[in-house]
Image (tube, rainbow, N blue to C red):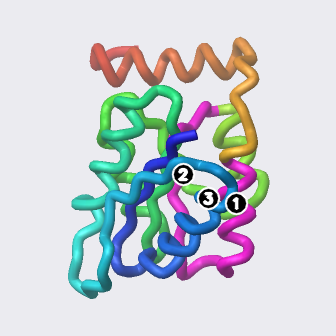
Amino acid sequence: MNIHIGSDHAGLEFKERIVAHLKLHGHNVIDHGPHTYEPLDDYPVFCIPAAEAVAKDANSLGIVLGGSGNGEQIAANKVNGIRAALVWSRETAVLAREHNNANVIAIGQRMHTEEFTLELVDLFIGTSFPGEERHARRIDLIAKYENEGKI
């Protein structure tokens, strides 16, 4: 699977470990940066391109990382077709896919251990959207608003 990833300085350390972890498990990882530590970088510069790439590649997923994950999620959600979910627990990782068909997750490096972060990533990637009617209907309403400006 293609997995696009982006972060800022506060997520760089885990990003590098997630990339290695995903490649070890056979995924094709596209790293949208940053590639070096710059304490004053801006997460939209890296997270928006990662989200844009997911929007263009229907069979891919994305991961955006920062200190809390909040700003990164907001940035990713500005891209048409992206459903980015802030993930902080096993349940939110699974439900992001099962109920929201999220195609991007945001994780805060300052919020979790590396081991738990990798578990969240694996849960997200390993969960599929079952397509239950009520969830599909809600996702369609969001997409309609995104594309037409009305529900």
Q: Which quarter of the rendering shows the C terminus? A: top left
Q: Which quarter of the rendering shows the N terminus? A: top right
Q: Position of residue 59 (x, y in %)?
A: 52, 29
User: Marks 3 and 1: which is nearer the front?
Assistant: 3
Q: Which mark is residue 120?
A: 1
* The residue stretch that appears in magenta: 100-124
Which residue is located at x 37 percent, y 52 percent?
A: 74
Q: Where is residue 62 in the image (x, y as percent from the top left)?
A: 49, 47
Within 10 Å of disc 2 (Cα), the crowding (few <14, some 14-19, many 20+) is many
Verify whether residue 144 appears in magenta. no
Which residue is located at x 46 percent, y 26 percent?
A: 58
Find numbered disc 2 in the image and state the secondary structure of the residue it sits on. Answer: strand
Q: Earlier in the sequence, mark 1 or mark 2?
A: 2
Q: How many labels does the image show?
A: 3
Q: Earlier in the sequence, mark 3 or mark 1?
A: 3
Which residue is located at x 34 percent, y 24 percent?
A: 146
Horizontal side of 50 relative to 117 (left or right) equals left
- Kindly indicate whether the residue at mark 1 contacts the one at mark 3 (C-beta within 8 angstroms): no
Horizontal side of 107 relative to 91 (left or right) equals left
Q: Position of residue 94 (x, y in %)?
A: 74, 45
Tell me which amino acid carries mark 2: Ile
Q: Position of residue 141 (x, y in %)?
A: 48, 17
Within 10 Å of disc 3 (Cα), the crowding (few <14, some 14-19, many 20+) is some
Residue 72 in the image: above or below residue 56: below
Q: Give the quarter of the image for residue 111.
A: bottom right
| Residue denoted by label 3 | 22
- Kindly indicate whether the residue at mark 2 contacts the one at mark 1 (C-beta within 8 angstroms): yes
Tell me which amino acid carries mark 3: Leu
Residue 26 in the image: above or below residue 109: above
State the CA–CA distance, disc 3 to disc 2.
15 Å
| Residue denoted by label 2 | 105
User: Between 73 and 104, which is closer to the camera in this rendering?
Assistant: 104
